[in-house]
Structure formats: structure tokens, C-alpha cells
Image (cartoon, rainbow, N blue to C red):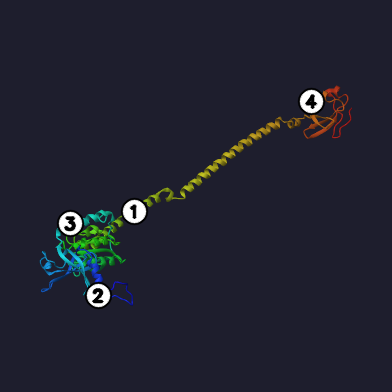
Amino acid sequence: MNTGPTSPEQPWPVRTVARKIADWINRLGAVWVEGQVTQVSARPGTATAFITLRDPSADMSMTLTCPIGLVRGQQPGVVEGNRVIVHGKPTFYPGRGTLSLRVDEIRAVGIGELLARIERLRRLLAAEGLFAPERKRRLPFLPNRIGLITGRASAAERDVLTNARARWPAARFRVINVAVQGVTAVPQIRTALSTLDADPSVEVIVLARGGGSVEDLLPFSDEALCRAVAACRTPVVSAIGHEPDTPLLDHVADLRCSTPTDAGKRVVPDVAEETARLRQLRDRGRRALHGWVDRERRLLDSLRSRPALADPLGPLRRRAEDIHALRDRARRAVSAALAVEQNGLTATKARLTTLGPAATLARGYAVVQRIDPAGAVDVLRSVSDAPAGTLLRVRLTDGAVHAVVSDDGADLGDNNPMASGGSGGVPGA
């Protein structure tokens, strides 16, 4: 057998490639595999049965071959939809170029084992926080469109649509029908979930299914589906089975409804209740507005009845009258004070006039002043201060005259009249 490298000039024949693959696969050891039976072919008269085993969480499958007696003698029987655990060895058949798992033992997965696995998965998801209440999102009050994932023409679909539209006739749905049990359920549900989550008009997604056995509801406890629901950006409502049924999807979803009917009632509000609530709120708003208007009107009336607003010019007039009265009083007080001061000034003037030298001069007296050579003038108080030749100024009531003291003026005394007068003066006697 040629084992050298291949080339366009030296290619391997098909048999060589098939043998090499068979040799490599035959070196693999036996394995235990779990899956869900989707097809069983055990024709009478044949020694080999063919089984298709599918992964419940992924779109993958493989072919099993086993003695036909292993299938017929299995209790319970190997039928489509059952979960089984098989022990076998990968085998490549060069003649057909196919790969299968040659099985020598098949074990059915019982209900107890399934429940135990679900419980382990429940603890795992809870530890990761997928059940935490704080990660639950509130549903929109009135979603623009509701995504519904359910079985085709199922009672669950009818319950959700009927009850939702009975409460809100304008509710809009985008329905995607999928398999809700069996090996294709999880892949189809995940595809529908991603489709609705990517639709911006869908604001809430409802997963609905009627009741069933534990095996029928197994897809809704699938780990891959639970993680897909947890990763959704759109709120998800779980309405699986009846009230006692609690698949893991109920804990991961944002809202758990006991039945599809309950889901139809909770995703939309009741138009009658909302209309009544609006009517009540409108009445309350009207009463509150009327009360506020009445209160403000009373306040305006009380403000308008106050003197400052009832007669806004009255205080100004009264203040003007007060100002006029005060001005008149001030004028009278000033006039009285001026009159008193004028009278005092007149009396003082009279006294000064009476006591002044002018009055004395008017009675016939004169004031004699001496003029010294420097031209200074002072009152002559004694005859001794006026020797002969002293220039004098005599002040009378209507003017003044000048005189010169004579030589014998001092001896004559008061009986000797003065011999000179006039403005120019007269030489001595």
C-alpha cells in the first residue's frame, strides 16, 4: 500500500483513503453517549438495526448500528423521542464510506435520572445568578408588538391570542410556530427566540405550551435554551404547562405565568379597567382643577377687596392731603418765626437807633474828633488832648465841619465860642 505523500501525479486511490480512515478510527476507544432517539430502523429479517441519535440542545446527530435483538429486547423499548445512553465504538465502513457508532449496550434514561439532572442544572444556573430577582426586567405597560413562540394551531396559541385581544383588542402579535417537544424543539425555539429578539418592534416575547408529561416538557429545562433566554434583550414571559409544572425556563424568564391563558391576561392591560381608571383620573383631575380655580378665585377676590386694590388712588390722595397740610403748617411756622424775628430785629434796630450817636446828634450834640498829623482820627475826650493849633473834626447830625484850636481856647472854657468853622477851617482868635 502506498504510504508516501500525495500529488497530482501520484494520488491515492479511494480504497487507500478509506482504509487509512478506518485504521485511524479503529484505534479509537469505546465511549458512552447520551442523546434522544429520532429514528429507529429495525426491519424484520435483518440482523442489524439502525438508530439516529440526536443532541437535544444542538442541531447535530449521528448514526448508531446495533444487533436487532438489542433493540427488540430493550425494556422499555427504544422508540422515537426517548432519551438513551449507549455504549459503543466508532466504526468506519470503507465500502460505504460512512461512520457510525457500533453499539453494544443501550440504557434508557429514567424519569428519576432526568429529574436529578434537572435539579443539578437548577443549582448550577442559580449559582450563576440566572434566577436572581434583580435581573428580572419589567414588562412594558402596553407593548407595541408581542412575540409569541408556540406550537402550530395549539390550544396555547389560541388561549394567548384570545385572552390578550379580549383585554386589549388592538394588541398586535408576531407568532412563530415551532415544535414544542421532541428533538427539534430546542433548536427551533432558540432560532425563533433570536429572530424575535432582533425585531425592534417586538417589546415582549411569550413562550407558551400546554401541559404534558415530564418528558414532553424536557426541552424547556434545556441548559442551552435557558441561557439563550437569559441573554435576550427583550423581556421574556414563560407560560409552560399548568400551575404544577415548573421547568427551568420559568425561573430564568422575566415573568412566569401559570398557564398560557394567564400569559394572555398579563402581557396587555384590560381596556375596560384602563378606561375606568382614566375616567376616575379625569374626574379627580377635574375636581382638583376646579378646587384650585375656586381657591385662586377666592384669593383674588380677597386681594381685590383690600383697600390698596379696591381704591389704589385713595392712599395717594390721602398722602397728598397730608403733604399739603404739612406744607401749610411748615409755611405758617416759618412765617411766624420770620415775623417774630422781624419784630425782634425792628425792636433791636429801634433800640440801637435810640442809643446810637445819631440820635444824640439830632438833639443838638456834636462829636469832636482830633486829627493827628498822620491823618488818623480819634475822639477828643479832654481839652488837654487838644492844644492850640490842633486840627479838629466836628461831626453834627447832618455833616461835619473842621476847626483849629485857638491859643486861648483852653482858658475860655465852655463860654468861649469857637471862631472858626467850615470845611476849610478858620485860623485861631
Q: From what the image shows, is residue 364 above or below residue 162?
A: above
Q: Are marks 1 and 4 in contact (CB under 8 Å)?
A: no
Identity of the amino acid at label 2? Arg
**Lower position in the chain sequence, tag 1 or tag 2:** 2
Identity of the amino acid at label 1? Trp
Q: Secondary structure at mark 2?
A: helix
Q: Position of residue 50 (x, y in %)?
A: 16, 70
What residue is pinned by disc 1?
292
Please state which of the two labelled residues, at mark 1 or mark 4, is closer to the viewer: 1
What is the distance, in whole Å, between disc 1 and disc 3 at their CAs? 66 Å
The answer to whether any part of residue 49 appears in the image is: yes
Identity of the amino acid at label 3? Ala
Q: Secondary structure at mark 1?
A: helix
Please state which of the two labelled residues, at mark 1 or mark 3, is closer to the viewer: 3
Which of the two residues, 130 or 369, is positioned nearer the viewer here? Answer: 130
Please state which of the two labelled residues, at mark 4 or mark 3, is closer to the viewer: 3
- Density class for disc 4 (Cα within 10 Å; few <14, some 14-19, many ≥20) is few
Q: Examine the image and state in which quarter residue 153 appears.
A: bottom left
Q: Examine the image and state in which quarter residue 225 appears.
A: bottom left
What residue is pinned by disc 4?
381
Which of the two residues, 48 or 180, is positioned nearer the viewer here? Answer: 48
Which residue, as the protein is rendered here, is positioned at the far top?
411
What residue is pinned by disc 3?
116
Quadrant of the rendering where the N terminus is positioned: bottom left
Which of the two residues, 96 or 156, is positioned nearer the viewer here? Answer: 96
Please state which of the two labelled residues, at mark 4 or mark 2, is closer to the viewer: 2
What is the distance, in whole Å, between disc 4 and disc 3 at their CAs? 154 Å
**Residue shown at 15% from the left, 58% from the top:** 112
- Density class for disc 2 (Cα within 10 Å; few <14, some 14-19, many ≥20) is few
What residue is pinned by disc 2?
15
